[in-house]
């Protein structure tokens, strides 16, 4: 699919890296999993710390990056629609790119971990030598009970260097700032990690 190839190129993900990460495209997500929209998508499988395919509610879990027009009409204004989706009722999950031995990383607090938002960023970061995991959204690190989700709870944080890198609008977006502070509180105050925040520079009015 040309749409998928174009998106992978924008992400900086080669075909080889896409295969290593398990990414593939489908012309109709609903044909793959009933209940999803009938839209073309890149399928982003999720993995456990041990490197196995993550299963949620008895099925392999993945998120979907929609590939059709991501803008919707509201009166005279076209606004950006939701670009990612996942099956209903599958909760908050963490993406561990399978190009890193996460089982070893989880047990060894001498290995720094980078945390970002978005799977593609984590995949390219790991491919370039960073041990980077991805949240599906800046608040996607706790469950409905407000506790750190199991996949993150299984990581040894005490004494570990943690670098949090969200998009360039983090410096001006109060929601992102609040999520950042909450994540630091969880990892540094409660679990004794050593957190740093990196700010990405913007490009004019464009988010980086």
Image (spheres, helix red, strand yellow):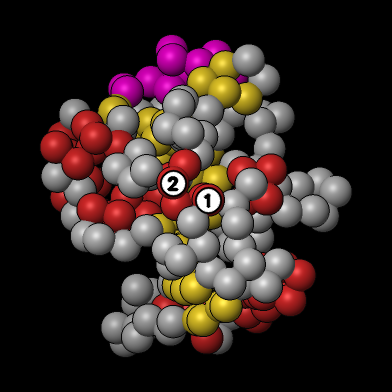
Q: Do the residues labelled 2 and 1 touch (CB within 8 Å)?
A: yes
Secondary structure at numbered mark 2: helix
Query: Residue 203 vs residue 71: left or right?
Result: left
- Residue 46: give x, y in percent of width and height: 47, 34
Along the line of sight, the residue nearer the viewer: 193 or 148: 193
> Magenta segment, which residues?
26-36
**Quadrant location of the C terminus in the rendered image:** bottom left
**Residue drawn at point x = 46 percent, y = 66 percent:** 110
In reply to whether residue 28 is colored magenta, the answer given is: yes
Badge 1 density bin: few <14, some 14–19, many ≥20, Cα 10 Å: few
Q: Residue 104 carries which label?
A: 2
Side of 200 where 156 appears, left or right? right
Name the residue nearer the viewer: 32 or 16: 16
Residue 12 vs 89, above or below: the answer is below
- Relative depth, front residue between 123 and 74: 123
Q: Which secondary structure lies at badge 1? A: helix
Return the residue at label 1: 107
The answer, for residue 70, to whether it is visible in the render is: no
């Amino acid at each position: 699919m040309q749409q998928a190839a174009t998106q992978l190129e924008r992400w900086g993900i080669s075909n080889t890296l896409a295969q290593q990460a398990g990414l593939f495209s489908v012309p109709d997500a609903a044909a793959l999993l009933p209940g999803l929209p009938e839209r073309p998508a890149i399928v982003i499988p999720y993995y456990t710390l041990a490197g196995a395919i993550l299963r949620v509610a008895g099925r392999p879990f993945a998120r979907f990056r929609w590939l059709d027009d991501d803008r919707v009409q509201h009166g005279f204004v076209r606004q950006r629609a939701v670009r990612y989706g996942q099956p209903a009722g599958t909760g908050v999950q963490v993406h561990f790119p399978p190009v890193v031995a996460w089982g070893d990383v989880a047990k060894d607090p001498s290995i720094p971990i980078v945390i970002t938002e978005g799977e593609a960023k984590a995949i390219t970061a790991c491919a370039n030598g960073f041990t980077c995991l991805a949240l599906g959204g800046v608040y996607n690190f706790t469950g409905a009970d407000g506790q750190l989700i199991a996949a993150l709870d299984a990581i040894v944080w005490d004494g570990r260097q943690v670098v949090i890198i969200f998009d360039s609008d983090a410096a001006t977006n109060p929601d992102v700032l609040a999520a950042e502070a909450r994540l630091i509180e969880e990892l540094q105050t409660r679990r004794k990690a050593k957190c740093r925040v990196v700010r990405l520079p913007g490009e004019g009015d464009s988010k980086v």
